[in-house]
Image: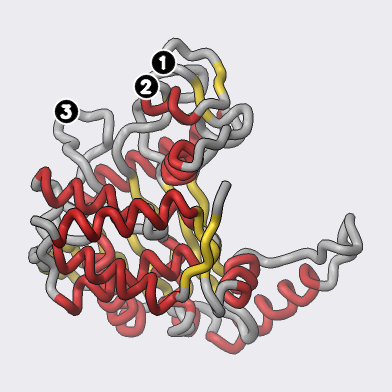
Amino acid sequence: MQTEQIKIELMVEKSARILELVGSSKADALSVATSLVDAQAAGHSSHGILRLVEYANAVEKGQVKPTAQPKIISDRGAVVTLDGQWGWGQIACKLAVELAAEKANKFGIGTVVIKSCNHIGRLGEYVEMLSQKSLISIMWCNGGPNVAAHGGKTRLFGTNPFAAGIPTEGENIVIDFATASSAEGKIRAANVNGLKVPEGLIVKADGSPTIEPADFYAGGAILPFGGHKGYCLNLLIELLGGALSGAHPSMNDSYSHGNGTVLIAMDPEFFFGTDQFMQDVNQATNVIKNAPPADPNKPVLLPGEVEEQERAKNSGGIVISAAIWNSILELEDQLLAR
């Protein structure tokens, strides 16, 4: 696979330019572009600039309204309901972060749900923002049906990611994972780059296992991770993401598209106090970090450390597949020619 090293500033500039060309304001285009490039820099290319082609197509189909802004439709104590109005999911989520933090600081806990919300990108970005405010957070969302039930073969569930942010005195803990065996974007990246996927991730339309990513796009399905345990967690997020947010579970007739999003922030001061919380967390994380590794060359890491290492490695420029970068340049040319 051929690769290129692209400066972060150039990647943000190109991404923002594309988003402006499809109708976004300069400020929103920069905000969404920054989120995509940060995901790329953190090593999550599945949520990186690869998504620009999908986003441009979604605007053309009317699924994304690039000028729409999220609005509060209900504010009841510690709970806020947002309507994303089918604008950019990242813009709605960044407002949700602000509101959840405000409520947590006032009530000890704040919950924000988002309906009519397009793809929100990497959940880790938002819980990381809250951990930087010394707040604990958990977040999840359902999405379009791509995942089979345990023992099934048809698409019923979204990849349904879960994330959590925990502040510490050192690097904050950022947990972020799909409850499917793979994020759909990773399968898409493999397909674009002509690569296989590991065994056990996807099945063909007839339910037989496959390592060809094209089989997924020919009507196959992604499997839950961890067998029945991942299936149960995926189901929990599907129901509590879709039904609590008003976006509906993805197998229901009332579901259309997008992410039914739930974000909860907590201020540890309202429990046993921030000082006690930090003492416990820091003692625990120090023990974990100093645990003897099975491989002396691979120290035990905390969630979020891999992303920080990737950002440091990519600070001088992000290595990206030439096929994906060229598709972004082609998209820009196509939009400029309109």
On the image, numbered disc 1 is attached to which residue?
A: 205
Q: Is residue 163 left or right of residue 20?
A: right
Q: In x, y percent, where is residue 103?
A: 29, 77
Residue at image point 35% right, 84% down: 105
Q: Is residue 160 visible?
A: yes
Residue at image point 39% right, 44% down: 237
Nearer-the-camera pick, 166 or 204: 204
Tag 1: Cα neighbours inside 10 Å, few (<14), some, or many (≥20)? Answer: some
Q: Earlier in the sequence, mark 3 or mark 2?
A: 2
Q: What amino acid is at disc 3?
A: Asp
Q: Quadrant of the C terminus?
A: bottom left
Residue at image point 38% right, 75% down: 10
SS type, badge 1: loop
Q: What amino acid is at disc 2?
A: Ala
Whether tag 3 and tag 2 are in contact, CB under 8 A, the answer is no
Residue at image point 52% right, 52% down: 177
On the image, numbered disc 3 is attached to which residue?
A: 253
Q: Which mark is residue 218?
A: 2
In this view, 188 is above or below 330: above
